[in-house]
Amino acid sequence: MKAIWLERTGAPDVLRAVDRPVPTPGHADVLVEARAIGVSRPEVMVRNGTYAWMPALPCIPGIEMAGVVAQAGADVTHLKIGDPVFVSARELATRGGCYAQCIAVPAQAVQPLPAGIDLRHAACLSNYQVAWHLLHSAPAGMTFTRVLVTGAAGGVGSALVQLARLAGKTVVGLARSAERCRFVESLGAVAIDARDASFPAQVLRATDGEGAGLVLDAVGGERFMDLLDCVAPMGLLVSYAQLGGPIPGDLIRAMRGHRANSPAVRCFTMHAFDRFPARRAESTRQLVGQLARGDFVPPIHSVLPLEEAARAHALLESGAVLGKVLLQP
């Protein structure tokens, strides 16, 4: 089978297309033949060696694919050959293995999909898993009506806009170009150019002077503290990535400078659910139902051949992607 092989960390060109043996499923496993493979930030971090949960090298990277069951082990009774499924490496012992034509995984680790579902859309589900938990788990029961999303044109950002809108929230999205702002607006959010130094004032105007009860940040970097100006009274600012670099300065001092609003700050990772896989699985089932009903349609920026994984990574790191990049075997 064709697969992408990672022997050492580095720039996108360390990803090599190779021939590998087709894995043999065990008695409780299924062999899944990929139809679409998601490209996400965790794989970029694995490739460049900065992921906190690195798989052992050499390896086949990749955390998500949608495909069909090609073989089923003798003890597998709930899946049959031809069934569509979603594979997430979040359910596997190793965070990887999906940049390949086939993968053998425990049958209990795959998510069955309804017949007729668009497998390209299903291959985007990892972004929606993160977005779902940012909206429904990270707030820990806090009530809010307005959401501010940074990096709103990206894979997780666009998923956040869609799911927040589905939940009846007013959404403001920050993006870093006129084109990206138009894309965010097309998803139903108020879009603000994050390059404008006055973006906190614009966020306040867009939220009737109150700010957002939930601020979800993927950027970090030099402007992170400015997001405290956007938090509504008793609101929550969640940092779930630092695509713009580390957050400098004294966060507690900055929070105390906004103590009239009593803001809270939380760091979030999906790995918090490694100890609670049942909660993660239930949210995935809900998302599959919403996807099947057409409640949301993942925006797909481009679909590239599996052999062009290096190009897909370079594209993702370029900042030009609107939505999701997929690989197709």
Image (spheres, grey):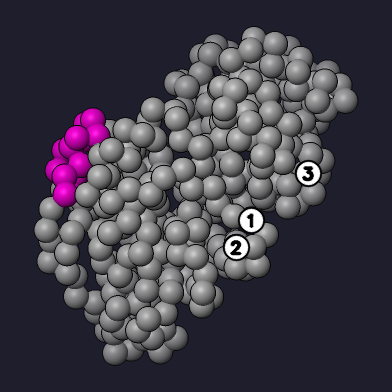
Q: Secondary structure at mark 1?
A: loop
Residue 217 vs 271, above or below: the answer is above
Distance Cα–Cα, label 1 vs label 3: 15 Å
Q: Secondary structure at mark 2?
A: helix
Distance Cα–Cα, label 2 vs label 3: 19 Å
Q: Secondary structure at mark 3?
A: loop
Q: On the rendered structure, is 65 left or right of 311?
A: right
Instruction: Residue at 64%, 9% (x, y): give it.
Output: 197
From the top left corner, tell me how far across and down residue 20 is, in percent. 13, 61
Disc assigned to residue 169: 3
Q: Is residue 131 magenta?
A: no
Amino acid tagged 1: Phe
Residue 293 vs 168, above or below: the answer is below
From the top left corner, tell me how far across and down residue 256 is, in percent. 72, 15
Q: Earlier in the sequence, mark 2 or mark 3?
A: 3
Foreground mark, 1 or 3, reads 1
Crowdedness near tag 1: few (<14), some (14–19) or many (≥20) residues, C-alpha within 10 Å: some
User: Is mark 1 in CB contact (under 8 Å) with mark 2?
Assistant: yes
For disc 1, the marked residue is: 296
Q: Is residue 324 visible?
A: yes
Total marks in image: 3
Magenta highlight range: 5-17
Q: In which quarter of the view is residue 65 placed?
A: bottom left
Amino acid tagged 2: Leu
Amino acid tagged 3: Lys
Q: Earlier in the sequence, mark 1 or mark 3?
A: 3
